Image (tube, rainbow, N blue to C red):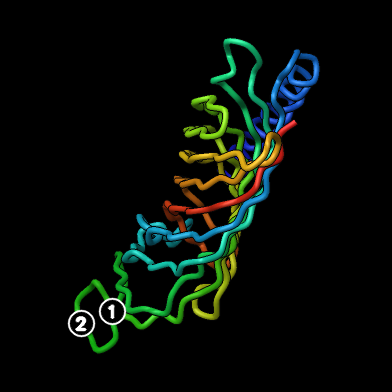
Amino acid sequence: HCMVKTNRLVYWAVILGLFISSIMGQASAADHAETYVALYGGLTIPQPFQEVVGLGSLSAVKLSNLELARSAIYGAKLGFFLPGRDRWLGVETEFFYTNPHIRQQNITFSGPGVGCPGGLPPPCPENFDGGHVRIATWAVNWILRYPGERFQPYIGVGPGIFWGRMSGVELGTGSDTSLGLNALGGVRFFLFKRLAVFGEYKYNRVTFDFGGTASIHTLYQPHHFVGGLSLHF
């Protein structure tokens, strides 16, 4: 399973890399194509880790949702919009990082052969100390915008490669790299001809199989609210 997943991710990484090289080459060759770079930061408001189950020999063990803490997010973009009648359409690549740690909380767990303290029937309650989580994402987005002179609302969607790592005293340590969804919508406002500010909402959906001593499968669905500056040329 791990080898198949690794091969699939390598395939997608090569495809995305070739695609980015191709579109950047087209952008440099096209007349009046609008290229831009951007830096941004903001807040990640994650949904809890859901569908939490064990891996391998622990695959029958199920945990309740794990609440995640809000986190800062930082990122950068590189993209371009097509010239002429296609100036509505663009492609960008971006990288962003956030660390929505697992909160200290009360959880429950259950599974065949699981015994609860005090002889109680499953699901078993436990006070969980929480843990550290780090998520880095590389995504390629197809962008559709209204090409106004000063005011430009836009939406976008595309695949992302997500690198995740979790660690904690009770949790153990595990990491995974997985392919997921990156969707966004925002508004850009030009302060000057080449400099703009923007605000953006982003949504991700990806499943992780955190191996190592953590041995946990989970669904990760964060909401990001960011703002930044973009330079157009």
Q: Is residue 212 visible?
A: yes
- The numbered mark, 2 or 1, whose residue comes first in the sequence reads 2
What residue does disc 1 label? 125
What residue does disc 2 label? 120
Question: In which quadrant of the rendered image does the C terminus lie?
Answer: top right
- Seen as rendered, the residue at the extreme top is 85
Q: Secondary structure at mark 2?
A: loop
The residue under the point 56% across, 45% down is: 198
Q: Secondary structure at mark 1?
A: strand
Give the image quarter of residue 135. Answer: bottom right
The residue under the point 48% across, 56% down is: 56
Q: Identify residue type, mark 1.
A: Pro
Q: Residues within 10 Å of mark 1 (few under 14, many from 20)?
A: some
Q: Position of residue 176 (x, y in %)?
A: 59, 53
Give the image quarter of residue 193. Answer: top right
- Seen as rendered, the residue at the extreme bottom is 118
Question: In which quadrant of the rendered image does the N terminus lie?
Answer: top right
